């Protein structure tokens, strides 16, 4: 299951207590204070892992706490530091402070990590407090509590190309023809319920990551349909492939379908609407597609690449156009 949001509470380990102790050995009746320091609490670390692509694991557990530091001991023995707790998340995870709403870190690259909740410092033992006027201190410091935070994690997929369009535009079929991905394909709207990623290979060992996103409908930016639940993932892409059903059996005509999606992207984010775009007219194998293609080209005033995701018509031209745009 694809989960792209999670809210968790993290807490660094508490520092161990310092020890109150006095050296007592044979022939050393008044050896003085020898209480050791408490160990430091462990940190909570969030790390981006390349082999994870969902936040699903974090929905089964809400609280994460690193190990506490151990208390100090006599003979000036320090307590053991608490172990760090590492929470693995997918690349593209944005960490928000759920209380203030502030963005703390964007883990956009695999391997990057951040200490999100520091452990508390261990308390000092009484050996630290001996002075010329107080040679037998009978007190030590308590450990400091670990830092605690409530976090909201938001995943934005990292892909080179994002496929957008109305439901049934043929995005899933196209992804299955261009890559080894096997998204669900069916002759009804909203067959894609969650983003799907595929790798498209080109010549000279070139590779592109393509994301198939659930179909958008009018009002998506306000939450209609699957709404803005998945629009955020397009923000990470470098290029938008806008797929238009060139021979719809029902619904808006191609030019109107294009206008609807462009308006939704614009309403959701100005930066999103300004991303480079490739317009693709799909289902060119159907009757009346040529006439509709001419009308669409006239309406948009830019190049439109005609394809048929079912028959494979025009796919080499499309793939080459994508690589020319992104890997010239």
Image (cartoon, rainbow, N blue to C red):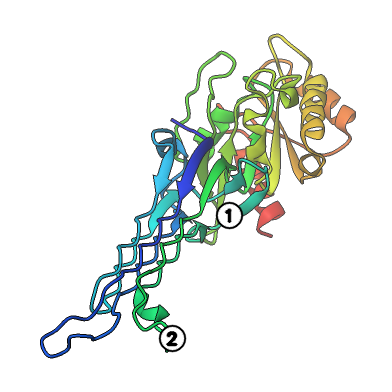
Farthest top residue in view: 250
Q: Nearer the viewer, residue 43 or 147?
A: 147
Please indicate, yes or no, whether residue 158 appears anywhere in the rendered image. no
Viewer-nearest of discs 1 and 2:
2
Q: Nearer the viewer, residue 173 or 92?
A: 92
- Measuring from the top left, give residue 293's x and y in whole percent: 78, 26
SS for callout 1: loop
Q: Nearer the viewer, residue 66 or 27?
A: 27
Q: What is the x, y in percent for residue 45?
A: 46, 57
Tell me the quarter of the picture where residue 57 sits. top left
Quadrant the C terminus occupies: bottom right
- Out of 173 and 54, give the one closest to the viewer: 54
Q: Residue at x 30, y 80 (%)?
A: 33
Whether residues under marks 1 and 2 lie with C-beta atoms below 8 angstroms apart, the answer is no
The residue carrying mark 1 is: 108
Residue farthest left in this picture: 26
Query: Residue 123, relative to residue 220: is it above or below?
Result: below
Q: Residue at x 64, y 24 (%)?
A: 215
Q: Is residue 295 above or below residue 232?
A: above
Instruction: Name the quarter where the N terminus is drawn.
Output: top left
Few, some or many C-alpha atoms within 10 Å of disc 1 (few <14, some 14-19, many ≥20)? some
Secondary structure under the numbered disc 2 in the rendered image: loop
Q: Residue at x 81, y 31 (%)?
A: 267
Q: Position of residue 181 (x, y in %)?
A: 46, 37
Q: Is residue 151 visible?
A: yes
Is 113 left or right of 273, judged from the image as shown?
left
Q: Is residue 308 left or right of residue 11?
A: right
- Residue at numbered disc 2: 133
Instruction: Tell me residue 316's x, y (percent).
Output: 61, 43
Q: Is residue 188 above or below residue 260?
A: above
Earlier residue among tags 1 and 2: 1
């Amino acid at each position: 299951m694809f989960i792209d949001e999670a809210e968790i509470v993290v807490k660094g380990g508490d520092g161990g207590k310092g020890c109150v102790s006095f050296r007592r050995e044979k022939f050393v009746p008044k050896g003085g204070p020898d209480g050791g320091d408490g160990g430091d609490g462990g940190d909570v670390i969030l790390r981006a892992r390349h082999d994870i692509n969902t936040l699903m694991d974090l929905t089964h557990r809400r609280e994460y706490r690193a190990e506490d530091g151990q208390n100090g001991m006599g003979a000036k023995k320090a307590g053991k530091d608490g172990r760090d707790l590492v929470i693995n998340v997918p690349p593209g995870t944005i960490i928000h402070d759920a209380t203030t709403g502030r963005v703390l870190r964007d883990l956009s690259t695999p391997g990057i990590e951040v200490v999100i909740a520091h452990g508390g410092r261990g308390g000092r033992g009484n050996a630290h407090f001996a002075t010329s006027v107080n040679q037998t201190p009978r007190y030590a410091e308590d450990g400091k509590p670990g830092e605690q935070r409530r976090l909201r994690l938001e995943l934005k997929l990292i892909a080179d190309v994002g496929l957008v369009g109305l439901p049934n535009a043929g995005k899933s079929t196209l992804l299955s023809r261009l890559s080894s991905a096997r998204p669900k394909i069916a002759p009804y709207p909203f067959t894609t319920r969650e983003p799907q990623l595929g790798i498209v290979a080109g010549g000279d060992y070139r590779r592109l990551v393509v994301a198939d996103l659930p179909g958008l409908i009018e009002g998506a930016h306000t939450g209609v349909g699957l709404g803005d639940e998945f629009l955020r993932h397009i923000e990470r892409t470098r290029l938008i492939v806008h797929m238009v059903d060139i021979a719809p059996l029902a619904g808006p005509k191609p030019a109107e379908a294009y206008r609807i999606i462009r308006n939704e992207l614009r309403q959701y984010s100005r930066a999103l609407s300004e991303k480079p775009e490739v317009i693709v007219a799909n289902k060119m194998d159907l009757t009346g597609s040529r006439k509709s293609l001419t009308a669409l080209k006239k309406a948009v005033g830019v190049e439109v690449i005609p394809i048929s995701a079912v028959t494979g018509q025009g796919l080499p031209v499309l793939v080459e156009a994508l690589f020319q745009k992104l890997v010239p």
